[in-house]
Image: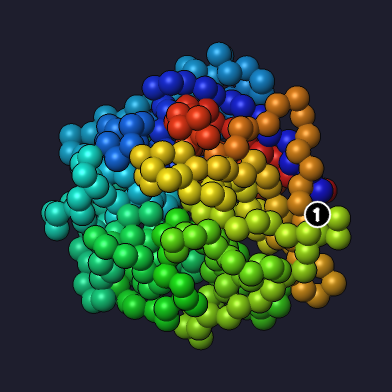
Amino acid sequence: MSIRWTCLSSLSTKARSSHCASISNKGTLLLYSGEFQPRKPVDGDVHVFDLNNAVQQSVADNAGLWRTLSASLKPEPRVGATTVFHGGNLYMWGGRGSIDMAPLDPEQSGIWKGQISQNEVVWEKLEGKGDEPVARSFHASVMANGKLYIHAGCPASGRLSTLHSYDFKSSQWSLCADAPDPACGGTAIASVKLPTSSSDEEVIIRFGGFAGHQLPTSTPPPLDIYTPSTNSWTTVVPSGDPQQGYPGARSVHGFVPLSTPDGTGVALLYHGEYEASDLGHAGAGKFWDDAWALVWREGALGWKKLIQEGDSTPESRGWIPSTSYTAPGGNTRVVLSGGLLSSNERSGEVWVGDVQL
């Protein structure tokens, strides 16, 4: 298996890390907030980029495919939030504001719904009742079976292993089973359907994170799986690549569902930090530039390191959102936007990765 990366855009005005990125069901990248300087949130605009009409290997020509949506009301700019795209709308939760990374006030926390049109986004704060999760940043979020899930992250102090779900129909938050310890920030989760499932239920899989050290700490590395119907977590150990072994421990990385024509693809793991900076959030650590497919083979999960083909590949980086979409033709397309580089600079690039068997 291989992956071919293509750079579609590179603009200094879009450079950021610890930002939000989602993709509409029409193939439009929606970029929101994040940081250009450490701990200082950038603008609260929604920047959109047309992925389907971008010309391969023509970065300069693609600059005109960006536009910024107008808004009469904007949530406060923030760092370390997450967004999901669902039912034609953008949903944003969490994050920290201001240079001192103070928690958001109650008026700013909670779920924000952005109704997206061609040139405008209309934001509104949604009601939340029940077991609402505490404010945090550098958590993970995903849509599964029509519900929003919020997992792990960093509250005012410490780290969390909690999982919460939000039902859009009832505006109800529910506390789910805690994930296996240790509590962490900077983890990544993906919503997938496993071949072992007898239904269409999506499960949530988790790999990596930071708990004062990079996770996981054991080799071979475990994979945690949450099943909503049983409200339970299980831990499995996928087999390694016969030649390349296993993916290394990491955090603030990408992890997205992966569909392949032969039906063996489950998820794709890419990039992320493997050694944290001594300066903490003010500095750049050391990053991976690899990509691994989690596949279903011989009745079990296994890892396959992807060969990176093409004339250029994205520089190693971390502090990126997990983003992918289904391109015309039905293939999964991974989208890598922005991120923190080892030079301690923020990238303004947008790369797409196409996986080939």
Q: Which residue occupies 24% across, 60% down?
A: 156
Q: Is residue 121 left or right of residue 322?
A: left
Residue nearest the observer in this picture, 350 or 55: 350
In the image, is residue 239 above or below residue 257? below
Q: Which residue occupies 42% across, 78% down?
A: 178
Q: Which residue occupies 78% across, 59% down?
A: 245
Q: Give residue 323's position: percent from left, percent from top.
A: 53, 46
Residue nearest the observer in this picture, 284 or 161: 284
Q: Quadrant of residue 118?
A: top left
Q: Which residue occupies 21% across, 72% down?
A: 129
Q: Is residue 328 left or right of residue 203?
A: right
Instruction: Count numbered badges in the picture.
Output: 1
Q: Quadrant of residue 98?
A: top left
Q: Classify mark 1: residues with Cα within 10 Å, few (<14), some (14-19) or many (20+).
A: few
Q: Give residue 289's position: percent from left, percent from top.
A: 64, 41
Q: Is residue 20 left or right of residue 194?
A: left
How is the rendered protein coloured? rainbow
Residue projecting furthest to the front: 278
Q: Is residue 195 visible?
A: yes
In the image, is residue 32 above or below residue 234? above
User: Given the image, on which type of amino acid does mark 1 rest?
Assistant: Gln
Q: Give residue 260's position: percent from left, percent from top.
A: 75, 53
- Under circle 1, the secondary element is loop
Residue projecting furthest to the bottom: 230
Q: Which residue is mark 1?
A: 244
Q: Give residue 330's position: percent from left, percent from top.
A: 69, 47
